[in-house]
Image (cartoon, rainbow, N blue to C red):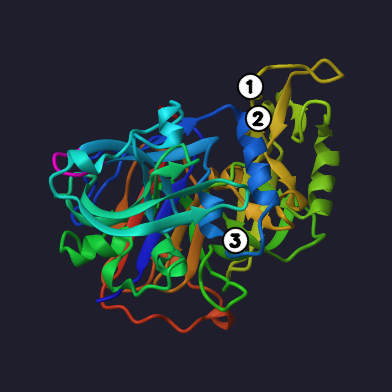
Amino acid sequence: MRILGLGLLTIASVNAVLFSSRSPTKGAIAVPIRRTCADPQRALERERARLGRRQGSNNTVESTLYNTLNGYTVNITLGSPPQQLSVKLDTGSSDLLVNVPDSTLCQQGSCTGGTYSENRSQRHVAVATDFSINYVDGRNASGDWISDDFGFAGVTPFPYTFGTGQTSTIDQGVLGIGYESNSVWLTDHERSNDSHTTLPQALVDFGYIEILFGGVDHAKYSGNLSTVPIIKDSDGAFKEFLIALSGLSLDGQSLSSGLPENALIDSGSQLTYLPDQLAETIYKQINAVSIPSIDDNIYVDCGLRSSDMSLGFKFDSVDQRTISVPISTLLIDPAQPFRLDDNVQACIFGIAKASEAAGRSILGNTFLRNAYVVFNLARNEISLAQSVSTSSSNIETIANNATVPAALPAPASSAEQLVPCSMIMAFLIVMHGLMT
């Protein structure tokens, strides 16, 4: 049985840790997720190198493996006896990649989150020897496809196929939970999907769940959940989380140049990238400056943390949903504090030009921390609402239907032919509050 998943990702704060490992409601599995930090300027340099060298729109795996500035990690086990690893959770890619201790990178002491050794497991099975991922910025991983016991969130470990980075320039493992069509097993080797599944599908196939990870937590957002269609790739397939950004405003004043625009929701990008003219207009309004002698970032007065200015991101839902992004949430501290020419403390600004991302508009973490986002892969739709910072919870599990509870439907003109499914999985990740 092949089914598609319903993914729910909530990012309400950059400083976020998850709900406890105890399931919040019957039929749900809670997965603790932790935010990790890195040198912001170094991380953004790597992000620009990655995005600036993209070739077209089919690089979802490449675009999401480097969530280095604000990466969200989950603890897993591999093997029998279990080996503990911490891997980055990735809504864009669809495979599990782990490093091995004898790789060149790990031998140099550059690996984080732990490694996997098949020789320490009694249940490992060699599947294939042609695991390989090549990245447009020069990063890559290659090794073997291995099947071994996989466990997380308290479920009984089950056999799962993953790739090992025996030769790798990726510093930490990645747990992909995105579209199956993006699996390296399928796209790189033109194999059947009968012998390899995504993690959500595997959890159902082994009979551990009918509803995966929960549902919609109505306490974590305000107003309506408004639904928009995911836009197909240039080859007519659903591979990335592309939606239409129909409008932008600054303190209620419309900024419409370059819109509407297809925008990629990418939790692997720290910054939000907008059409150049729009970005320039915003820079002028808040006195942002570039300092080429330091780096390629845009800098503003850190005093804007006390500003009540906000950007409004409007989407083409039936109610023309607007997500408010306070300017104060768009500031990032540089690794080494310094002052601007007018003697004010400098902060990195979280909006960049689309020309730095090969011309693509991207809704990265500086946007996502203010939004409650539901990825409905069964209907190829995304529902959005304004996030709310609260410790309260009001979870409604998603039953055997393809709709998001309490969400407004997508505009009728945008309806796609739905993929038949007899069971819907719900994926709930909540990154909320200011815990560490």
Residue at which label 1 appears? 335
**Residue type at tag 1:** Ala
Residue at which label 2 appears? 41
Find residue 7 and report its horizontal and vertical position in percent. Answer: 39, 60
Res 293 quadrant in image: top right
Q: Is residue 71 left or right of residue 405?
A: right
Residue at image position (36%, 73%) is: 402
Q: Are marks 1 and 2 in contact (CB under 8 Å)?
A: yes
**Disc 1, SS:** loop
Q: Which residues are magenta?
A: 77-82
Magenta-highlighted stretch: main secondary structure? Answer: loop
Q: Earlier in the sequence, mark 2 or mark 3?
A: 2
Residue at image position (51%, 67%) is: 239
Can residue 313 be spotted in the picture? yes
Find residue 167 and report its horizontal and vertical position in percent. Answer: 44, 44
Q: In front: mark 2 or mark 3?
A: 2
Residue at which label 3 appears? 321
Mark 2, other Cα within 10 Å: few <14 / some 14–19 / many ≥20: many
**Disc 3, SS:** loop
CA gap between label 2 and label 3 equals 33 Å
Residue at image position (57%, 60%) is: 59
